[in-house]
Amino acid sequence: MNRNFKFMIVAAGIGCALSSFTSEANYTDYVPYNGWEATGVLTYGNNFNKSITNKELLKITRKVGSILSYENNIRQKIKAEIQEAISGEASLASYDFQILGDLEVKLIGLSDGTIEARVGNISISAYAKIKKSWYAKGKIRVSSNKLTLIGKYNPYSGKLSGLRANSGFKMNVDVDVDSILDLLIPLFNSQFTNKLEDSLKVGFENSIISALNSRLDGYEDVLLGLDRYLPKNQYIYRGEDYAIKVENAFKDLISNESLTVKLTSRQKSLKFNKDTPNITINRVDINVSNNLFLNIYDDPIIETEFRPECNGNDCTVEP
């Protein structure tokens, strides 16, 4: 085959690829200003299932997002505890933190007519690097078993009170210091690490409980405002409004009945949008005595727009 002809074929292939890439890069995904909606799916046993999408349900998912900000509160509190514990001894080189598990609020009707609240079902994991200088560096690992705060729920005010950590809750703090000072001062590392571990354990549990309490307090009427935000006359089955049945379950739990609310937040990616590559999807799942279920989640409208003026450069549409 002629050498020049081969070159023309290769060049044409590269040109097509570049053209395809450029045209693809001219598109951007985004959520328009009025594009945020939420969907609520109600299921009753094996007999009734209905899905409704409207903007009123966003008031519930937005409260989910507000409550879940407790995670950032705990992240900052644990970081502050570490910084205070090492103050004057070392500095914080890096810090990583995560909550393991989804936050649950479980309400249980008791025989005395009160409602017990169990909040949590989560565990904690944190990792920090500390340093003094070139001759002294260390690692701090923080972990816990499952944490559940147990207290009371007022069905009329929607407030939780008297929350205390479950008796089996335990924080584990492991400090590992690598220092040549152990050669000069025998047992320096063990004395320093034991002191640091004891100091951190004292503050962590109170920090976590106060962070959770601060996010769960102050919700009037019923948890998440379900008495106001669930759409009426939409979930009708055999003449009964099952949205009202969910609301009433928050107020009228009798002995051996329970209601569990699970709160989650996940990231959803948007294509070709470098300014806003992800959006947050909040969700609440409600289980009433394993018989009545309500799942509410953000359901935004994602649109794609062609922007020829971008020409492959960063170019996005503001949501």
Image: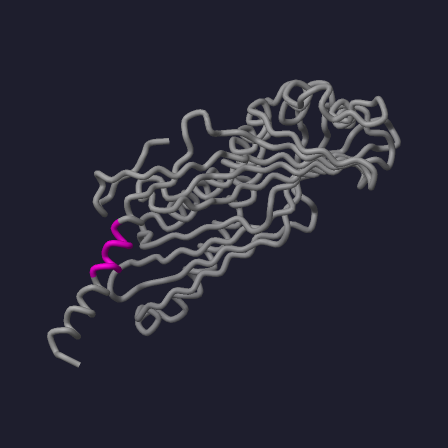
> Which one is in front, 15 or 173?
15
Picture coordinates of residue 35, whole percent (x, y)? 46, 29
Question: What is the quadrant of the N terminus in the image?
Answer: bottom left
In percent of the image, x 66 and y 44: which residue is there?
148
> Which one is in front, 178 or 14?
14
In percent of the image, x 53 and y 41: which residue is there?
265
Decide: is 171 above or below 119: below
Please provide the residue range marked out in magenta: 15-22
> Which one is in front, 108 or 183?
108
Decide: is 234 above or below 192: above
Picture coordinates of residue 20, whole percent (x, y)? 28, 54
Residue 117 placement, left or right of 5: right
Question: What is the quadrant of the C terminus in the image?
Answer: top left
Q: Kindly tell me whether residue 214 is visible in this rendering.
A: no
By what rule are the colours in the image chosen?
Answer: one colour
Q: Kindly tell me whether residue 193 is visible in this rendering.
A: yes
Decide: is 51 above or below 195: above
> Which one is in front, 145 or 280?
280
In percent of the image, x 34 and y 41: which residue is there?
28
Quadrant position of residue 182:
bottom left
Q: How many marks?
A: 0
Is the magenta region chiefly helix, strand or loop?
A: helix
Residue 197 placement, left or right of 48: left
Picture coordinates of residue 147, whole percent (x, y)? 63, 47
In percent of the image, x 25 and y 50: which residue is there?
22
Q: Is residue 169 magenta?
A: no
Picture coordinates of residue 92, whole percent (x, y)? 33, 52
- Residue farthest bottom in this picture: 1
